[in-house]
Image (cartoon, helix red, strand yellow):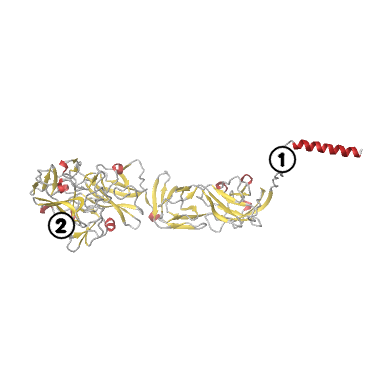
Amino acid sequence: MKTFDKISILCMGLMLAACAGNKEQVPDTPQEVKPEPETRTLTFVLPKDGEKTAWKVGDAIIVHGEYAKDQVTVTLEAGDIMADGKTAICTVKNLYPYVNEECTSTLYAAYPAEAVDNLAHCFYYTKFKATDRQIMAAYNDATNKFQFQNLCGSMSFSTGEDFTSLALVGNKKETLGLEFLQVLLTDKEQNYAQYLGAPIVQMECPASAVTTIYFPAGTTFPAGLYIKFKDASGKFVKCFRTYDSISIERAKNTDLGDISSEVVVYDDPFSDDILDLDTNGNANCYILTEPGKFKFKAVRGNDHTSYLEDAAKADVLWETWNDDSEVEVGSIIKSASYAEDYVIIHTADVLHPGNAVVALRDLNDKILWSWHFWVPKTPIETKDYDNLMGAPSMDRHLGALVATEAGEATVDQQSYGLFYQWGRKDPFPGMFANNGITVAGVQMERQNGAISVAESIANPTLYTYSKRGDEGYEWCTDITEEFWSEIWGNGGDKTIYDPCPAGYRVPKGSGTAWTKSNTGWTFDTINGWFENSGLVFPYCGYMDDNGGSYGKNLERSVVWCAAASSATDGKAMYIKAAAYNSASARAARGSSVRCVTE
């Protein structure tokens, strides 16, 4: 019986082996067995610094091991929170610690729970959905204590006003936040920015009496930032800008303090009732024919590619009615402001004919650029005039309120227009030409001593002149080839210093008006006008290049073109009594401009 059993068993084994040889071999792999969940008493401790100074009932903390599906949400109850408020102790079930060779920590915590967006296989990483709050992370030690660490830094300030929310952007469009942030925190390694999500360049968040805003660690604002505040109606009503450098450090707060004195009214340039003056292009001069609210880009002249940096505020420099009347402040431009790379102006409700200049400043009140606003009394006409000016010409000088008419017995002083030193973009009323012009606002000044181009931009009401040996007078210490002309001496393309409105420019000097052989002039020295080909000019005088003046009664006029005669001279039409000449004139001379089409 025993022999038979042995033989039978041997035969059965051979048969099974033979059958197995006809099938695919299956490796003998052990089946993974999920460990049993653990119950542990965990201690959660808040960081020393940060807006959150105490745990509150209902605070939710995520605790995880290797898998996101196994993470546990711990919701704190009153009995969990210790007397100091910074410590919470509670018993937590269903924990699956993650054991690995790289560290001894096995559990990982994050707060707030609703901000956590862990990946399926999270190991010892923690991923957050955003960075615009006080997000914290921690790992356990041997006693299951979790010492939380702040992942972001913060900035705080107070405004003294009740706002519902705010929108913030860096002056250099810096990254303000991230759509996600993943960190690696263990007892062996601490990486506070393991992976970064898409950057956020504009942040919106609630505002309060003391507002705290969170940013990823290392965020810097080297040129400062800009904040807009909303009221209860949902409209932006106030704004704040600083150009001070700000750096955000992890776990630290940068306190700007009370900024209420620097919060100003916000004039929304994207409001439907604000009209865009740049529809025809950017320029240093804008013609206004009706009252209203208007905006234009804060750029240098016709350079629409780059906005003026460090801009903070705008104001009205001066206004004139082009005569000796006492000018009412705000009769042309009532107010000016700056927002969102735009200058916004509000005209008077009833627009008075005249001229005004608006300046854009930085926080230190330095003028960065200025613009001329021209309100004519009668419509401006543009005609060819037998190509006298080299292109179709306006019927009046730049800044003139009316056109001079041939045959007039008395030329209207309001047809004289404004005066320009050759190459400068900023106008001067005829205050220094004995023409009896009054100005409201900043008064014009004269200075014996040339200034740089940058200084002239920062001082648009300063008329300067300086003697250079035997070469005569000039206003500028660094005259370049690119004032009113991109081509030295030939009147090239319009530049950022050209004082004419969009679509117009200072004449190139290619028309017959700038040739010495030009004929066809009619002069009326008694009534104060001269004419050629139907184009009429007034004897309006000029401001002399040495600080003196030649007024209207001296039967003289100078009209610039964009071409230069030398490093210190501009090319001009020069009229003296009944004599015409095309000649050089010192760049320091304040003379007329007659705009032509580009």
> The N terminus appears in which quarter of the rendering?
top right
Residue farthest toward the right in the current orientation of the protein: 1
SS for dot 1 = loop
Relative image position of residue 230 (x, y in whole percent): 42, 47
| Image location of residue 399, percent across then percent down | 21, 48
Q: Which residue is mark 1?
A: 26
Q: Is residue 562 left or right of 361 when viewed as pictured?
A: left
Camera-side residue of 369 and 133: 369
Quarter assignment of residue 535? top left
Which amino acid does the dot numbered 2 rest on? Ser
| Residue beneath disc 2 | 549
Q: Foreground residue, 457 or 494?
A: 494
In front of the other: 380 or 198: 198
Q: Position of residue 575 (x, y in %)?
A: 12, 51
| 23 vs 122, nearest the viewer | 23
Residue flagged by tag 1: what amino acid is it? Val
Q: Earlier in the sequence, mark 2 or mark 1?
A: 1
List x then y, in percent, for residue 162. 43, 50
Circle number at residue 341: none
